[in-house]
Image: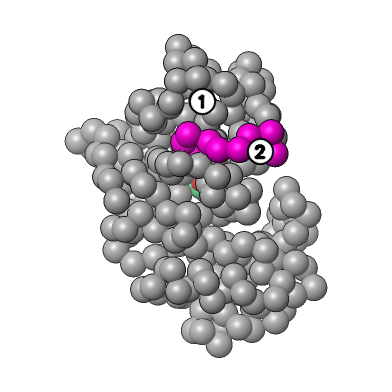
Amino acid sequence: MTQDELKAKVGLAALEYLVPNEWVGVGTGSTVNKFIDALAASTTPIKGAVSSSQASTQRMLALGIKVVDLQQVERLAVYIDGADEIDGHGFMVKGGGAALTREKIVAAQADQFVCIADASKKVSVLGRFPLPVEVIPMAAPEIMRRFVAMGGSAMLRMKDGHALVTDNGQHLLDIQGLHIHDPLAFENQVSQWPGVVTVGVFAHQRAHVCLLGTEAGVETIRY
Ligand code: 5RP
């Protein structure tokens, strides 16, 4: 099976976690796009969706799915999103699609986080995938120096020859070479650095369930 087929399988499997007549939080990325396509064809009645990015909003609206702002919703029954990495505790690295800040905000208002991922995303220790960190631009050089002091290397994410600008008007760093053995402590530490908007470690907003696409089918892992 191709990676794309595995993503489609977990996107479809996530429909089982919809709570009828409730709101669903929707993440961002190629795996979530498969979920959005499945959601558009689903017969489960939902109140609508809250989106974590302009890209997911546009895709949902184009498919006729009602999207409302998070401010209009107090609690979400479930949040469904992909990950760049997920470990054995449901701790994740996210932000490969540059949407980490809104993803963390929406996830924090959900009763359950369902991660959908193909098997390549499973790791024993976070840090294989470059860690995204959204930053206020003027703070970027100092934040990069702090990651270098930790033993990592930091790059400003670029797009079309310019620094990528997130949906929130900020910049993104990608950090390589870290082994994140204590994701909760790491998230606490980096989140306190001045100028860090969001660190892509999702430990406080970890997954409760992972639907992992494998050659043998969709594996359900609960944490
Ligand atoms: C976007 C994300 C995505 O969930 C993550 O990058 C996984 O994406 P994909 O499903 O395309 O592999 O965090 O900010």
In the structure shown, which secondary structural element does the residue marked by tag 2 occupy? helix
Q: Is residue 107 above or below residue 17?
A: below
Find disc 1 in the rendering and name its residue. 22
Distance from the alpha carbon under mark 2 to that under mark 1? 13 Å
Q: Is residue 41 left or right of residue 50?
A: left
Give coordinates of residue 177: x percent, y percent.
46, 75
Instruction: Give x and y (percent) for residue 161.
Output: 76, 58
Within the image, what quadrant is residue 10 found in? top left
Question: What range is drawn magenta here?
Answer: 70-80
Magenta run includes residue 71:
yes
* Label 2 or label 1, whichever comes before in sequence order: 1
State yes or no: residue 84 in magenta. Answer: no
203 is higher (above) or lower (below) than 223? below
Q: Is residue 177 above or below residue 122?
A: below
Callout 1: few (<14), some (14-19), or many (20+) C-alpha neighbours within 10 Å? Answer: some
Asked if residue 2 can be seen in this view, the reply is no
Where residue 197 sits: x, y (%)?
Answer: 67, 63
Q: Which residue is mark 2?
A: 70
Tell me, yes or no, whether the two marked residues, 2 and 1, touch with CB atoms within 8 Å: no
- Name the image quarter holding residue 189: bottom right
**Residue 30's disc number:** none
User: In the image, 62: left or right of 177?
Assistant: right
